Amino acid sequence: MDNVQIGLRAQDFHESLRFVGVFGPKDVNFKRTLLIGKAACLAMHLRGLLYVEGSTQIEYVAASLGISSLELPAVLRELEEVDFLSIVSSDGEIKRIDCRVPEFRSGYEDLGQRWTQLKPTVIEQAGVQSLDSLYKTPLVLSDLQSGAGISPAEFSILADVMKSGQLLSIQPVDGRQIAYTPLAVDGNPAAYLQWAKRFPQEVQAVTDTLIGYQGLSIADPRVHELTALSDAIATGVLMPVQVNGATGAQKFVFAPKGGLQPEERTILDKARAVVACVRYGQGFSKGRRIKYPRAILDRLRTYKCFKHGHPDLFSQYGLLVENLIGHPVDEGNGRWNFQVHDTPENMKALDIAIDMVEHGESPAAHIDLEAQKALLSSSGYLGPLSTRPKLTTEPIVSTETRTEIIRQMAKIARGAALHE
Amino acid sequence: MSKAVDLDLPLKLRLRRLLFLQGYWTPIEVELSHYHDLGVGAGMKRRSLTDLDVLGIKFDPLFIQHRVVADCKSGRNVSDANRLFWLSGVMGYFGADEAYFVRSKLDRHIRAVAPKMGLRTLNDSELGAVEKSTGADAFQLPLADVGFHQSVRDLWGIQVAGGSKITADQTRLKKVYSYLSYTYWYIERYRNLLTLVGHFESIADLLSPQNERHVLLAYTGAARFAHSLLEVASFVASMGASDIPQYARIYLYGGPLALKDKERFFELLQKATGISEPLDPAWLREVIELLGRMVRNPVGAAEILRYLESIYVWCVRLNMPTPPALTSGAPNTSGLVLSKDTAVTFAKSTGISEDLFAKLKLL
């Protein structure tokens, strides 16, 4: 396993087990993995910050991420070890935390390397390896056990811990116990397992293809070459995102991502909508095509609009209007720009979209918005907010109706609707 | 070893302090040189052209660079008119926005001519009045203290005892001093970051945190590293900053076509040799991460140069435990954090000991 995968899987362990109370097998056998997972989770929230004053804010943030105040010093030490931060202390108290979490490269590589340096137990190694294998494909339980290379008693501990955090599920399929991870399933596990049963050898290739290129057009030759991929689309295991642009409708598929809270799912759906629109611009635009998707996403993240308007933008980014990510702006002469609504959810969705385009995986989907707000606010933790935008189901409508919906929603977004 | 007394030095230092308080990083006595080719295999020879008394450089939060040059003269045997024309040329050479001609006493005709050449003039008493009105005369850093300045200047360069030969290690160090003193101001700006790191890599094994000379050399290197990076940031910002890593590479390799050429060259190199040597040096990715933090924190980035200069004076030389105040306003924490970040990244990139910046790391 490469270090990036180790870092990602360690974060999965922490995030899945954080709501499991004190549990001997977990706390004794997975402490190094959980430590690195907590470090990865906190680092993800510190990314983009230059420093944090004092210790109160970081303690609140850590608590909301499932890192207790007693665990925090150890987590901060690990982040210092990988040089993601340095702590400035005065009289034994944290005065300031200077952050250097990488933005343009994957910090998981450093964290994965650190995990190896900490000499994880054989159960931890087998757990991280098993989770990574299950990400790629469901396995017969006995195969998973033999592949883990540990004793039956150790495997029982591993399975109990992973099941307690819903990292591992076991379902009978045709009389055999099949192990899978809910983290790899977007929707219905039963459909996923049936599909995996039909294509046991191809599941990994499908996952790798989609992680390698998030937002793959279903018109792409790879979809037709990989029968398992076209079957997954046809049977609803993968649910494509449709964009109705200037050259017609196109659908784009993404690597499955499970184990998300409802609000995280909403944000992930927004991110997928963003990536789908950019992919449309890369492959199906009527005019000049997008060459640097990362640059486009960075532009939207920073400036909340495109540098120049374009006639295609109105229809191409209609999906984003429906997802309440922004609204079209008429620049005259048939040119349209797109204005992103500057909300924490939308900014997070853009961060995830950037991760998807750059790294394939989207660990930032687990970003806790409240924790991040606490970091950015001067008064510390503000408490949970109850209102979050809900994703609407995609209607099947004509282009005319769709255009009208977009116009009306744009008016609402501009605040003009009340006066009509 | 002290050098001959420079009668102009008090004026230079006072102007330097004044500019520093206005937000400028202020190297003094910058020597302009020209290098000419001695023929195949014979290397380059440096020829000194002239020296500039005070150079002020600052980047605003939009990463627009502002430059001021100054000529400070106190003696009698000086043709002021000649100096004005000379200063006008230097101003153009350095791309400066403003130039100061500072003289103990100024004749009327000089005051009349200078504005036509786009130059500013100050005599001794006028400089004093400006110092008072800006609070420069009460500034806590001893930037205008001649004795302090001499004590720092005495630490610059290698020391070869009389009658003895320069050692191989001293020769290596001398090349770096020469680069910082002369070549840095001569070569194309985009080449400085890669060249600077290369020079310090070559002496990383020699620099000791216990050696005062080496600490000064390291701080000087870190300041040039920051300056080179701010120039990259300026270019990146001018391109819109939407793709920081790519724009940085375009700048550092001399433009989009030069970048393509170099990428192609490395492809061919790999084909020819089978060795997978990447175009980008390994340290570049961390430097680009730092560049990203600078671009996203422009108010702090604009103060890195002054922080590095003042921390050396305040914390290293004067042994003060707290960060220096750059102005009377609130401290710029982003600037301080980015200064540390710059020094640490410089140390990591070049392989020099981070302990050379031990005082800075405590802040």
Image: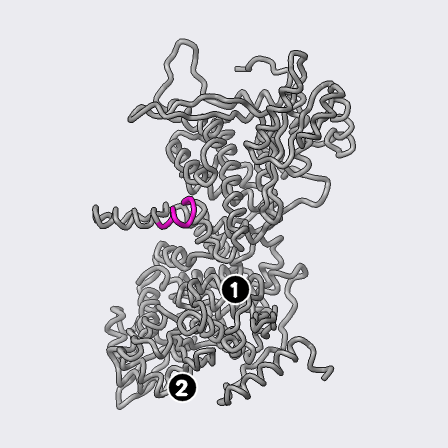
Q: In this figure, which residue is indicated by the disc labeled 1?
A: A67
A405 vs B223, nearest the viewer: A405
Q: Residue at x 41, y 36 (%)?
A: B195
> Subunit of mark 1?
A
- Disc 1 element: loop
Main SS category, magenta section:
helix
- Look at the image and tell me in which quarter the N terminus of chain A lies: bottom left
Q: Residue at x 56, y 56 (%)?
A: A49
Residue A282: quarter of image:
bottom left
Is A267 located above or below residue B102 in the figure? below
Q: In this figure, which residue is indicated by the disc labeled 2?
A: A188
> Viewer-nearest of labels 1 and 2?
2
Whether residue B287 appears in magenta in the rendering, the answer is: no
Three-letter amino acid code of the residue under disc 1: Ile
Is A44 located above or below residue A398 in the figure? above
Is B236 located above or below residue A182 in the figure? above
